[in-house]
Amino acid sequence: MLEIKHPYLLFLGDAVDQLAAKTADGVARWRPEWCLGQLRLPGCAADVGLPDMSVQEAQERGARTLVIGVANRGGIISDVWMETLLSALDAGFDIASGLHNRLGLLPALADRAQRLGRELVDVRYPELELRVAHGEARSGRRLLTVGTDCSCGKMFTALAVERELRARSRKATFRATGQTGILIAGTGVSVDAVVADFISGATEQLAPANDEDHWDLIEGQGSLFHASYAGVSLGLLHGAQANALIMCHEPTRTHMRGLPQQALPSLQECIDLNQRCGQLTNPGCRVVGISLNTSQLADADVEQTCLAIEKETGLPTVDAYRHGAGRLVDALPA
Amino acid sequence: MLEIKHPYLLFLGDAVDQLAAKTADGVARWRPEWCLGQLRLPGCAADVGLPDMSVQEAQERGARTLVIGVANRGGIISDVWMETLLSALDAGFDIASGLHNRLGLLPALADRAQRLGRELVDVRYPELELRVAHGEARSGRRLLTVGTDCSCGKMFTALAVERELRARSRKATFRATGQTGILIAGTGVSVDAVVADFISGATEQLAPANDEDHWDLIEGQGSLFHASYAGVSLGLLHGAQANALIMCHEPTRTHMRGLPQQALPSLQECIDLNQRCGQLTNPGCRVVGISLNTSQLADADVEQTCLAIEKETGLPTVDAYRHGAGRLVDALPA
């Protein structure tokens, strides 16, 4: 499985707004200890709160990888970035990217990297040798974040649970399944990019047998109710063999992301189907809590919304990002 | 989408037994009108009931494609076959294969094919430009065969329904999702080999909008209850947007194929979950009948087994291969 060396220099390029640097923001937020600084080109409209730093300064401080933390339209590698990327290779760094088009397919980068012995890490493209899932019970505890929809807080929630468990001195590892998650974890598998037959098998490899008191916090993808991506979600659910699920939900959403004709499922439907399917590979699998993404709510409405959903479902309900994951961790099975 | 030209010459090679020529057997059984003959090498222990024919004889009768209808251990292309394959290219044929290793990666074949302008069709590797599923309602009728497990008759059942509909002069097209199915249909998509994000989208492309009175008979794969492959099955179910499902089942199986620790689901569980998930993209989706693979039963037990399951489920239950699909077609929604 791929390994990205840290510390990182986060490359924000010429990001057109803060959202374009969402990846850098995630890495800076969840792995501040790995991030030496941010590199911004003229015109960059994003800031992830790290010291501005040139390639040379980062080199002096021991950076190992330049992480491309910016996306432009189309997910391509901009010509404007090229001089910086080449100088990063010259300075001894690897480069890691979650963009669609591969670093290794750009001849200028590929040639320079090969000549200097640097790694170009395209986290979107799984490099592990894929295996079909075996479905056999394995040791250790696993939590999977699932959702009513795509993009509703599954990565943040898994990371918040990892942070809380570690704060309680418990063994915990975030397991990344998407591009930003992999840059945050320094490793992982982009499960939506593996060949369909191997979704569950890749998840088994990502979260293997472990100590009985160790928790893997597996980043979920999509939703069993998303007509485009549910196959990925089900493969992940079976491969995760999860002891616990946390249901992630964005309470203001009126339809499934990207599918204007499709309504969101009810929380209870979504809880039921995830438990039912999860129990195929772990009969004890159950939803232990709800994590709301309340970023679209007025501050004054957050507590009331959490309380209402807690009453409706009977499950502890928090915004794991806003409130921390303490109540979710309290709800984990012993 | 790929297109395999017919008529075919079926290549049985040095098949070690009848089962090794299962692919040729399927093609000969379901597309006899496309099959001119079988080509067997010395030592071949299989026979699919077609006239034995050399490359030259097949050429004289107008064959367009040599179909590799045999599998050996490992799914590789045997050296022993090479002389025949090259002579088929020389005779003007394309070659089609569902094996793991690609025809196009063997330099001797690739060079000869390119020089002569022949196609090497590796049906296992989808060539279509993949799109994410849109999930929008589309015209036409679609039936998907689903199953309690892998390898329990989903392809045969879809083909039997196609045959019965055509016998009744109704518009019907078998839609292939696996290697043998694609060789039988002459086109299709190997859905388990597409990148996970595109399972449903590939199925939408495979069975597009059509006349309102046209039925697509889509070959299912795997099972929602198979811990290795359920993601493929769910993506297919959502992409199929099926009006009708037929549940396929092998009544003597004691555990899921390849997973000795995992019991089969009950038929009713399997019916419920498939309907529930299928209704996401087609609210009218329901299981209309059961197709048993009774090949492992004694003849004397077949009728009794069908009757018992028909009583248990309240659904017409046949072995579509043994009995034909008449009762299943009668159960289709108008």
Image: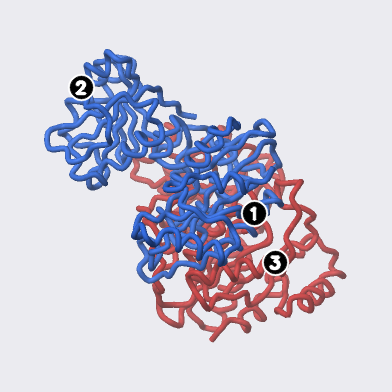
Chain colours: A blue, B red
Closer to the eye: label 2 or 3 = 2
Q: Which mark is residue A286?
A: 1
Quadrant location of residue A50?
Answer: top left
Foreground tag (3 vs 1) = 1
Which of the pair B48/B153 is nearer the observer?
B153
Q: Position of residue B322 (x, y in %)?
A: 72, 70
Residue, far bottom: B334
In terms of depth relative to the viewer, which is nearer, A183 or A116? A183
Q: Amino acid at mark 1?
A: Arg
Q: Nearer the viewer, residue A131 or A205?
A: A205
User: Which residue is located at x 63 percent, y 57 percent?
Assistant: A275
Q: Quadrant of the C terminus of chain A?
A: top right
Tag 2: Cα neighbours inside 10 Å, few (<14), some, or many (≥20)? Answer: some
Residue A304 in view of the camera: yes
Q: Earlier in the sequence, mark 1 or mark 2?
A: 2
Q: x and y percent of residue A21 in the render?
A: 27, 41
Q: Which residue is mark 3?
A: B269
Does B114 sit above or below residue B65? above
Give the residue type that dot 2 points to: Ser
| Residue B202 lies in quadrant | bottom left
Q: Which residue is mark 2?
A: A54
Say left or right for B289 vs A13: right
Where, by quadrant of the figure, is residue A143 drawn? top right
Q: How many marks?
A: 3
What is the C-alpha distance between the residues marked 3 and 1?
A: 19 Å
User: Which amino acid, by three-letter code, is at mark 3?
Assistant: Glu
Establish if B95 lies above or below A138. below
Q: Residue at 45% x, 52% y: name it.
A: A319
